[in-house]
Amino acid sequence: MIPHAATAIGCLAESAVLNKYAFVADVSGFDLSLFSALAPARLPVHGMMTSWRRLSDDFDIVRIDLTTPTFEPELQKIAITATTDGEAVGVIQWISLDLAEGVTFSNHPNDYSDGGWLQILHTFPRPIRVARGERLDLMLGHDGASIMVSPANV
């Protein structure tokens, strides 16, 4: 079955566990923080099994109409409003598929526990402190093969 559309959805995320997963700092007395720049920008996570806290409402990262023969790469800047104070390690992303009229599938981290569709952590170059009501500009899009999420000022 080919879905009609696919939407990547996400939210800002804070997590001491994911921070250690995404960034390296002091190891046995040695500052290895420069190696964080070499880490992958996208890491698989299991949203229900990993301790993390949302810092924003859900937002669409990209939506692709799969009924069209081609879709052009896109990149847009959007402002995400923090709903609580915290330190955003990045954006947790999941997918929602429109399979047929009225039939959808989602691996939303709040209620998905079956199957092998993990969520993705799009890491920031470094954690970003946000305050409730503050807006964080993000660059969101895709190049036809990969989804991109990045702070706009990096």
Image (cartoon, grey):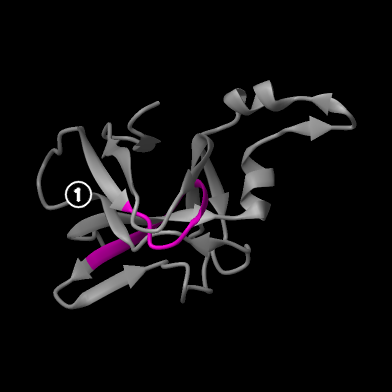
Residue ID for mark 1: 64
Residue 80's place in the image compared with 41, above or below, is below
Residue 39's place in the image compared with 15, above or below, is above
Q: Nearer the viewer, residue 18 or 86?
A: 86
User: Looking at numbered disc 1 in the image, what kind of residue is underneath it?
Assistant: Ile
Residue under the point 15% across and 34% down: 72
Q: Which residues are magenta?
A: 81-98
Total numbered circles:
1
Q: Predominant secondary structure in magenta?
A: strand
Assess whether residue 129 is covered by the magenta stretch: no
Picture quarter with the N terminus: bottom left
Residue under the point 39% across and 57% down: 11
Q: Position of residue 67 (x, y in %)?
A: 12, 52
Picture quarter with the C terminus: top left
Disc 1, SS: strand
Q: Nearer the viewer, residue 67 or 38?
A: 38
Q: Nearer the viewer, residue 65 or 132?
A: 132
Residue situated furthest left in the rendering: 68
Mark 1 crowdedness (10 Å alpha carbons): few <14, some 14-19, many ≥20 = some
Q: Position of residue 6 (x, y in %)?
A: 25, 56
Q: Position of residue 122 (x, y in %)?
A: 46, 43
Q: Position of residue 47 (x, y in %)?
A: 54, 63
90 to the left or right of 78: right
**Quarter of the image where one finds residue 32:** top right
153 to the left or right of 92: left
Residue under the point 52% across and 73% down: 114
Residue under the point 62% across and 67% down: 49
Q: Nearer the viewer, residue 142 or 90?
A: 90
